Every structure is written in structure tokens, then in C-alpha cells.
Image (cartoon, grey):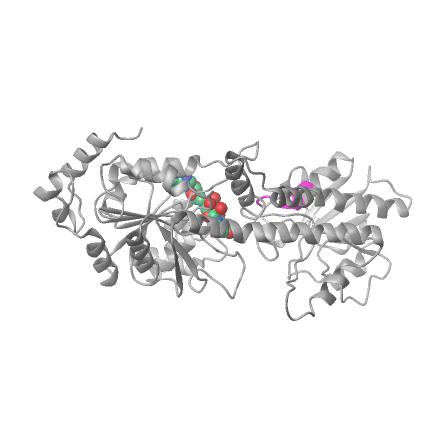
Amino acid sequence: MFLTGASASHRQRDRVTGGGTAGDYMTGEFAMGGSRGQDWGDILTRKIKDRSVRIGVIGLGYVGLSLAVEFAKTGIQVTGIEIDTEKLARLRAGESYVQDVKPYEVKGLIADGKLVVVDDYRALSELDAVSICVPTPLSKTKDPDISYIAAATREIVPHLHPGQLIVLESTTYPGTTDEVILPELQQTGLQVGEEFFLAFSPERIDPGNAQYRTQNTPKIIGGMTRRCTLVAKALYELAIACVVPVSSARTAEMVKLLENTFRAVNIGLVNEVALMCDRLKIDVWEVIEAAATKPFGFMPFYPGPGLGGHCIPVDPYYLAWKLKMLDYKARFIELAAEINTSMPWHVVSKVVDALNDQRKSVKGSNILVLGVAYKRNTNDLRESPALDIIKILQGKGATVTFHDAFVAELTSLDGATHVPLKPEIIRAADCVIIATDHSNVDYEWMTSQAQLILDTRNVTKHLAVGNGKIIRL
Ligand SMILES: NC(=O)c1ccc[n+]([C@@H]2O[C@H](COP(=O)([O-])OP(=O)(O)OC[C@H]3O[C@@H](n4cnc5c(N)ncnc54)[C@H](O)[C@@H]3O)[C@@H](O)[C@H]2O)c1
């Protein structure tokens, strides 16, 4: 339950924390209902500069664990708060469940006490800055589900204290920080921009990207006030090479949605071009490769079996939903989503046609799906189009197996069995669908064994073998 302004202020005055600023805000001035005379922004900035700032991260998933480790690597004390006890146990054992976070880093930071992980929100009382990195999924009706953000905010309220910075990192619709989080935090009676600080800073993590990691990817920051932006900027500059301030939290929220909508719409466009080229009997890959020789005004995007991951298929719906509240239809977003979600069906229809050419029916056929993660060289299955392809094929009566060395611990997936990539298994498949182009597969060898291949990623383009039995999107 949220605190009322009166009771929250009372609790603020009465609380004694172990933090260095406890004495500061327990003064008579603060007890009078404010923290007059104290420059809390200055106090927090000094702690950031002398690196005594204590940072907290709520939600230790792909985003939160990467951020917590990045801050802790600079020598700052970091506390991670996570509700999944299995994740906590793995971290305490020095393991990492996030591919881009190295186990030896977690192990070292936990052993040195630089990274402490807990499931108890009372730790928030001791922290100067807290980043919220909880999930923002869609409901069944594809509306934003911000219940995780609301729950984390409710947990922060009883522990919010003067000189504390709260930063939301979860991707969400413009207005979440000031319409959802701010009113809750203000129930404490504390003043934003004066006593506590609130900002939005979108995460731009790109799983599997060896060149751009958390540390060297520029980070956008937009605060509720200019002071909030400056304090948050100072904090993130401890660990991130380039921090880019913008004028407001809403702007920062919109920046993230522009970035991901840009990708969703461009992928939707190129997927539609693939559908057109299919009708025109033109190789879409050749068209894109040739167009990409233009040194200006063109940026190549590539077709595929559909969108996957936690971001691109989800985030544009957050924007479309918000605009619907304002009687505006986000047409590009809806159209791109329609085309992108139709791609698994297109893949299956190509398989059906190719089998038909061989006088085979899909019903009773044996289909091997190669690569089920949504992205090359990752183990992330979230929203993966390979899962849709498996379900559609099963619905048509095919027996589906899959192989993916990145998710090898999975023995089955939606009724499909994981199989090793052995010659007899490849040969037994009526069709192999390359759904994900992992780099650890010998495609030339695999092609030499297969009867028929549907390549959705153009990974077989340079192969000398396979003439006549490879079909591309
Ligand atoms: N994964 C990406 O590549 C990526 C990239 C950019 C932005 N984002 C955004 O970042 C946010 C987080 O994404 P993620 O991929 O890290 O999600 P995730 O599911 O991997 O991690 C979220 C973590 O938060 C924990 N959690 C949920 N509620 C909690 C609570 N009340 N208190 C403490 N812990 C709680 C969950 O147990 C989970 O471990 C989302 O909004 C997402 O859209 C993700």
C-alpha cells in the first residue's frame, strides 16, 4: 500500500539509516517539513565525485546485472535487489546467467564484497542512488504491463530519503516517470529536484555485441528537473564513457521508443520487400546487397523469420498504446507489426511449397529447425519467431525437432525434441529450416547432408554446395 504524504514524511523524519547523510536529514530543519538549508543535490554530487556513493539496482536480469557489474567494476559499492531467489543463489555462488556478463567478474565482485545481492528492500534505506531495471512486458491484449515498475516504486516509497536519486531504466511509454513514479514518490512529502532526484535513462544493451557493451555505449539521461538530470549524469559518468543529457524524462523515454520503433518499422519494410520479391521471383538479398553500395541515404536492414527478443517486438506497442490514449493511431507501428508477425507463416508456406514440389505433404513430414534463439550467437528465446514456426508446423501435422548449441540444456521446446547435429539426423529431415544463423554451425557440411534447406538468414549465400536444394526467403 502506498504511504500517505503525512505518514511518509513522519517516517522519513524518524528513520535512522546507516548512511553518511543520516545526520544531515535528521536535523530540525528537515523535521519542520523540508530540508531547507541543505543542498541535497550538492551532497549527492560530492558523494559521487569522491566515489563514496552507494548504488542499488532493482532487478538483476539482462539489463540490471550488466549495469550492477559495470558500476561495481569501477570500485563503487553496489547492492543488487532481486526477487528471484534462484538468480540470487547463482550470483552468490559466483555464477552468471547473462551471457555478456562473465562469471569470473561476478565471482570476483561478490568475493570482494563490491557487489552484494539481496531480496530485502530494507537495503534501499542505505543507498544513495537506485536504478530500476524490472521487466516491461505486454499483456495478452498487447497493452503495456507496467505492474513491475509500480511494484518496485511501491517498495522504494518507505525508504526514500533526502539526497537519494531514483533512475528508471526499464523501457516504457513517455510519461511513465512523471505520471506513474513521481506521484508515488511525492507522497513522502519530499520535493523532487530539491530533496530527492528522479530521472529516466534507457538501457541500450545489445546482447552478443562484442564491440558495444554497457560501458562504451552512449547513455541518454533525462531528469524530472535540470538538477535531477545533472545528478544522474554525474552518477552514470562513473561507469559509462559517454552520457547524453536531454531536456526531460519524457524525452528520454521517447528516445528509446524512437530507436526501437525505427528498427521494427525498417525490418517490417524489408520483410515486406522480401514478400514482394518472392512474388516477383527476384532474390531480395541480392537487391539489398546492391542497394547497400550506395554510400549515402540508404541503410541496409535484412528480412528474416520474424522479430524476436524482449525489445523490438514489444516496445513499439508501448508507444502505440500511449498515442491511442491521445486519439492518435500509430499507423507505421501497426503495419510493421502486422508484417513482422506474418513472417513465421511465410516461412512455413515456403516449406509447404518446397515439399509440394517434391511430391511430399507437410503432414507427416520430418522438419529440423536449426537455431531457435531469436538472435545469432545468443541463448535468448524470448519472443523468438522459431517458436512460432515450430507451433505452426506442428499444427499442420509435421514432426518437428530442433538443434541449437546455445540452448543445448533444453531437451524439448513446445513438443519439439532437441537433437544433435549428426549426419543421419540431418539426412532424415525432409527439410532443415535455418531459423537462426549461429556461427558455430558448419553450414557447408550441414548442406552437404541435407535433402532440402530453407535458409531464412542468407547464411548459405557463399556455399559452393547445395545448388537446387537451398531455398531462401
Ligand atoms: N534485454 C535487453 O536486451 C534489453 C535492452 C534494452 C532495454 N531493456 C529493457 O530493460 C528492462 C529489463 O529487461 P531485462 O531484459 O533485464 O529483463 P529480465 O526479465 O531479464 O530481468 C528483470 C529482472 O527483474 C526482476 N524483478 C522483477 N520485479 C522485481 C522487483 N519488484 N524487485 C526486484 N527484482 C524484480 C526479475 O526477477 C528479473 O530478474 C525492460 O524494460 C526491457 O524492455 C532490455
Where is residue 181? Give x, y as percent: 35, 39
Considering every residue shown, the one lying at the far left of the view is: 28
- 63 relative position to 421: left or right: left
Residue drawn at 30 percent across, 30 percent down: 2
Is 402 left or right of 21, judged from the image as shown? right
The quadrant in which residue 399 appears is top right
Please tell me which residue lies in front, 350 or 256.
Answer: 256
Answer with left or right where residue 420 lies relative to residue 357. left
Magenta residues span 382-388
Residue 341 percent across, percent down from the top left: 67, 42
Residue at 47%, 62% (x, y): give it.
213
The residue that appears at 63% across and 48% down in the rendered structure is 307
Q: Identify which residue, 152 or 320, lies in the foreground.
A: 320
Quadrant of the displayed image that contains ligand 1 = top left
User: Does any portion of residue 86 appear in the rendered image?
Assistant: no
Q: How many circles with numbers are drawn on the protein?
A: 0
Name the spot of residue 389 as percent of width and height, x first. Answer: 70, 43
- Let me know if residue 130 is in the magenta part: no
